[in-house]
Image (tube, grey):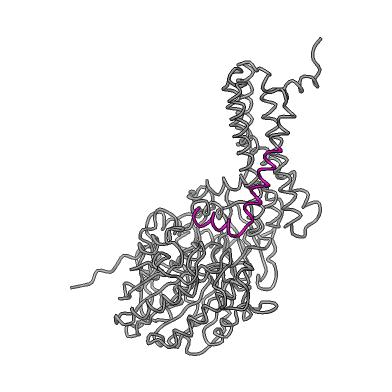
């Protein structure tokens, strides 16, 4: 009598491949539970139907990821003959490895929850960057989160899964599987995996106009793999392009401005910026502030008590740009935007890429004009390749954490802001005495998890480890630095610039949540801010270097993609911006977002007033904006990839 389907399934479940089926199902359950937790914990207001759609929308990619995570088991079980499979030492070693594997997987799932809490995103490029620097990241995790408790929970859950697996597939060790059966299971799994791999699309979880809903629908492991795969992607293969001649023509038109004369052929962006050689070579101090978004500043409309009382007062003394945006949400994006005036290409920032040994920076511009240059960073210069980028592109010296022998206070990210600013005063004083003009760029670290700082500086307890308190400490330290600088001999001839590297956190429904990218840009010092002013013109970090050079007022050669925001009349403002693998351009309250697979989305509205809304039917102005965005990013990618984003020094006539 033939066996019933129920008996056949029981027999299969009792075999080693029934165990792989259990493993596959357990992964799907875990992915679904995490998605449910994220939906209830972080899901934005949305129609109930759209919220529930995250489960079927994410199921396809969950199945694909779960199958690929099951393949190692299938391979192993297909290779082992029954006598080795049932061998007691193999059984014990296998269960131990399986327990550890599940403990790691549960840890990653819990970690994904905390990652989502911070970034409102599945694992992305930030997670990839953090994995490359375990010294800072893992100690920071240990200091910030209840790691022992999490490890205990992971161990308990893993032990429970191993226990249940042995109950469900209780006869797997005694049930032989023929070589033919093992080969069929392996072939079937590989065929199914190949079919699923070919059927997966990057855009399939983009079911909503609400970005966070789409992130919840995604799968963390798939998102992480996509981020790793696209670090050095071929721009033209994944993003829309224009004919090369049209792209350069548009880019040159967008960069044209009074006093800028293009030099060279039509496929060059090199320009000579007019100025007076008689103008003094003013010193420049750029204070690049970690995560100091506009949301903390009372002078930029923070609701409730301001967290920046010192900077609010200083903003009434200087040139205060109130409509500026970061180009990305990582420090390296602030690096390339502020220092190189370079668009934030998809993939990695050029700070971390392999063709950045000779690119244009404000340090290069000023060195050509006889300046001394120094970069001061509270952390380790190896992090994100910042030291390499600086010293290869115009900075004479790079001072980092190891150069602070007796810091007042330090976290895993580096020395506290007051130590950094004290050293900055010393360096500026010494440079001033040398008789040469100087550029000092200073990158802080205190406004970063675990948000601790020296006690007694502000009323708030540093042991509370709150971002708001770290911001207040940052404000206190900056205020103290600028008060000290007023008494230095170099103060009268120095331009001081306060600019954030990026905002504090990402929030918003758009593919690029631009409102969370708003940052302050403050210029101080009698040499530049002769008359205080609040300046509302739209801009981004690409405009910082051209604006500083415009304040100095001396002629220079440039390839920069930004504008001098102080031109009269002000230039038409624009924002070039990046989020994960999306890139965008905003102008005139309209934004276009270019995505992988050559997709484009359009948004409208003033992000300072309202959430920008998706435009389903772009008009002619939207399509023109799209072409301008394509041109800027396409030209930037070509110049970088061909190592042409640099100004060749002029040969002086004898």
Whether residue 137 appears in magenta in the rendering, the answer is yes
The number of numbered discs placed on residues in the rendered structure image is 0
Q: Quadrant of the N terminus?
A: top right
Which residue occupies the foreground of this view, 80 or 156? Answer: 156
Q: Residue furthest left?
A: 654
Is residue 92 positioned above or below 214 on the image?
A: above
The quarter of the displayed image where residue 267 is located:
bottom left
Q: Left of 73 or right of it: where is 245? A: left
Is residue 159 positioned above or below 646 on the image?
A: above
Q: Quadrant of the C terminus?
A: bottom left
Residue at 47%, 59% in the rendered image: 247
Which residue occupies the foreground of this view, 314 or 96? Answer: 96
Residue 508: image x %, image y %? 67, 63
User: Overall secondary structure of the magenta stretch?
Assistant: helix
Whether residue 404 appears in magenta in the rendering, the answer is no
Is residue 425 positioned above or below 116 on the image?
A: below
Q: Residue furthest top?
A: 1
Residue 204: image x %, image y %? 67, 46
Is residue 206 positioned above or below 486 on the image?
A: above
Residue 511: image x %, image y %? 64, 58
Residue 108: image x %, image y %? 62, 47
Q: Left of 495 or right of it: where is 434? A: left
Residue at 38%, 73% in the rendered image: 261
Which residue occupies the foreground of this view, 107 or 605? Answer: 107
Q: Magenta segment range? A: 134-160
Q: Residue furthest bottom?
A: 531
The quarter of the displayed image where residue 621 is located:
bottom right
């Amino acid at each position: 009598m033939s066996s019933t389907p129920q008996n056949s399934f029981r027999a299969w479940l009792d075999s080693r491949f029934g165990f792989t089926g259990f493993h596959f199902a357990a992964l799907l359950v875990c992915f679904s539970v995490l998605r449910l937790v994220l939906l209830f914990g972080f899901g934005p207001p949305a129609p109930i139907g759209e919220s529930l759609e995250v489960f079927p929308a994410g199921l396809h990619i969950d199945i694909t990821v779960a199958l690929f995570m099951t393949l190692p088991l299938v391979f192993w079980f297909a290779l082992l003959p029954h006598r080795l499979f049932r061998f007691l030492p193999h059984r014990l070693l296998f269960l131990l490895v399986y327990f550890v594997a599940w403990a790691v997987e549960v840890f990653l799932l819990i970690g994904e929850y905390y990652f989502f809490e911070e970034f409102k995103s599945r694992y992305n490029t930030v997670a990839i960057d953090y994995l490359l620097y375990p010294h800072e990241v893992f100690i920071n995790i240990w200091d910030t989160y209840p790691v022992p408790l999490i490890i205990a929970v992971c161990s308990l859950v893993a032990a429970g899964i191993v226990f249940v697996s042995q109950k469900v597939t209780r006869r797997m060790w005694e049930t032989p599987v023929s070589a033919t059966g093992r080969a069929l299971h392996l072939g079937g799994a590989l065929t199914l995996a190949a079919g699923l791999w070919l059927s997966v699309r990057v855009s399939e979880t983009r079911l909503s106009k609400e970005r966070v809903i789409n992130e919840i629908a995604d799968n963390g492991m798939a998102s992480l793999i996509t981020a790793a795969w696209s670090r050095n992607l071929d721009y033209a293969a994944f993003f829309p392009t224009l004919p090369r001649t049209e792209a350069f023509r548009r880019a040159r038109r967008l960069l044209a401005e009074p006093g800028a004369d293009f030099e060279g052929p039509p496929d060059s962006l090199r320009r000579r910026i007019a100025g007076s050689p008689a103008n003094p070579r003013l010193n420049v101090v750029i204070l690049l502030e970690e995560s100091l978004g506009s949301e903390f500043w009372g002078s930029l409309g923070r609701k409730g008590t301001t967290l920046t009382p010192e900077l609010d007062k200083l903003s009434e003394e200087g040139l205060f740009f109130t409509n500026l945006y970061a180009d990305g949400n990582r420090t390296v994006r602030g690096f390339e935007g502020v220092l190189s005036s370079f668009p934030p290409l998809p993939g990695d920032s050029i700070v971390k890429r392999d063709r950045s040994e000779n690119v244009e920076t404000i340090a290069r511009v000023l060195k050509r004009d006889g300046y001394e240059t120094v970069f001061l960073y509270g952390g380790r210069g190896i992090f994100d390749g910042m030291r390499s980028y600086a010293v290869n592109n115009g900075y004479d010296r790079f001072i980092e954490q190891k150069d602070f022998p007796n810091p007042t206070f330090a976290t895993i990210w580096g020395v506290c802001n007051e130590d950094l600013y004290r050293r900055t005063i010393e360096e500026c004083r010494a440079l001033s005495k040398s008789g040469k003009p100087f550029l000092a760029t200073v990158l802080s670290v205190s406004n970063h998890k675990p948000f601790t700082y020296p006690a007694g500086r502000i009323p708030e307890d540093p042991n509370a480890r709150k971002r708001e308190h770290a911001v207040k400490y940052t404000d206190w330290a900056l205020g103290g630095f600028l008060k000290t600088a007023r008494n230095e001999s170099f103060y009268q001839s120095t331009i001081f610039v306060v600019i954030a590297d990026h905002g504090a956190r990402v929030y918003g429904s758009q593919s690029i949540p631009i409102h969370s990218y708003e940052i302050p840009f403050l210029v101080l010092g009698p040499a530049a801010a002769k008359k205080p002013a609040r300046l509302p013109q739209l801009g981004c970090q690409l405009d910082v270097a051209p604006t500083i050079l415009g304040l100095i007022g001396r002629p220079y050669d440039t390839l920069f993609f930004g504008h001098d925001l102080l031109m009269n009349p002000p230039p038409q403002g624009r924002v070039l911006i990046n989020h994960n693998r999306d890139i965008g351009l905003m102008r005139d309250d309209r934004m276009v977002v270019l995505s992988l697979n050559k997709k484009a989305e359009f948004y409208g509205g003033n992000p300072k007033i309202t959430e920008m809304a998706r435009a389903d039917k772009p008009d002619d102005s939207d399509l023109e904006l799209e072409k301008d965005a394509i041109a800027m990013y396409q030209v930037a990618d070509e110049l970088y990839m061909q190592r042409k984003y640099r100004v060749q020094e002029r040969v002086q006539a004898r």
